[in-house]
Image: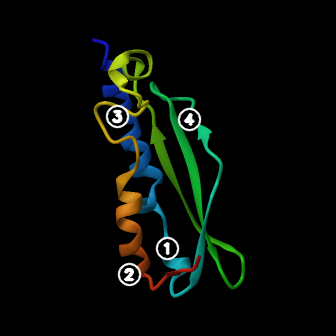
Amino acid sequence: MMVVDEIIGKYQFEALCKANGIEAADFSNARSLRVRLEVSRPVEVVESIIPIDVYELSVISADSNERVVSYKDYYAYGGWLMRHTPLNMGSARPMLFDGSCPQNRRLRPEIFEKFGVSLVE
């Protein structure tokens, strides 16, 4: 079973996304604010069966420069099979799942609209 690490890793990854992603963040402090996003440098998650990087996203008030919300985004790499055999076809991403927290990008516009948050570049 050369893919068991990816099967376990998928469940670990999904649990991290759910517990620390945008859905778990409290946006009530950002209500009606103009904000910008700051993304940290990646840090490796050490307690995972497959390599996973975590980024902290900080929602910063454009007016006060204060961090009002933070949440995490994760990126996973494939298991042993995807990283060490030709099956990867040039990609180190997982074979069994996307390798990113899709709800973070999908829900951000919806959450920003719900709380009246406007993103400035």
Q: Secondary structure at mark 1?
A: helix
Q: Is residue 69 left or right of residue 104?
A: right
Q: Earlier in the sequence, mark 4 or mark 3?
A: 3
Q: Residues within 10 Å of mark 2 (few under 14, many from 20)?
A: few
Sequence-wise, the earlier of marks 1 and 4 is 1
The residue wearing badge 4 is: 45
Amino acid carrying mark 2 in the image: Lys
Q: Residue at x 44, y 77 (%)?
A: 112
The residue that disc 3 covers is 10
Furthest residue in direction front, as rendered: 90
N-terminal of the pair, mark 3 or mark 1, is 3
Which percent across, then down, holds residue 27?
Answer: 49, 73
* Residue closer to the observer: 85 or 62: 85
Question: In the image as oriented, which residue stretches furthest toward the top?
Answer: 1
Left or right placement of residue 7 versus residue 41 in this view? left
Please tell me the numbered disc located at residue 114: 2
Q: Which residue is mark 1?
A: 27
Q: Is residue 39 above or below residue 12?
A: below
Q: CA distance from mark 4 to mark 2?
A: 31 Å
Q: Earlier in the sequence, mark 1 or mark 2?
A: 1
Under circle 3, the secondary element is helix
Query: Marks 3/1: CA distance?
Result: 27 Å
Identify which amino acid the numbered label 4 is placed on.
Val
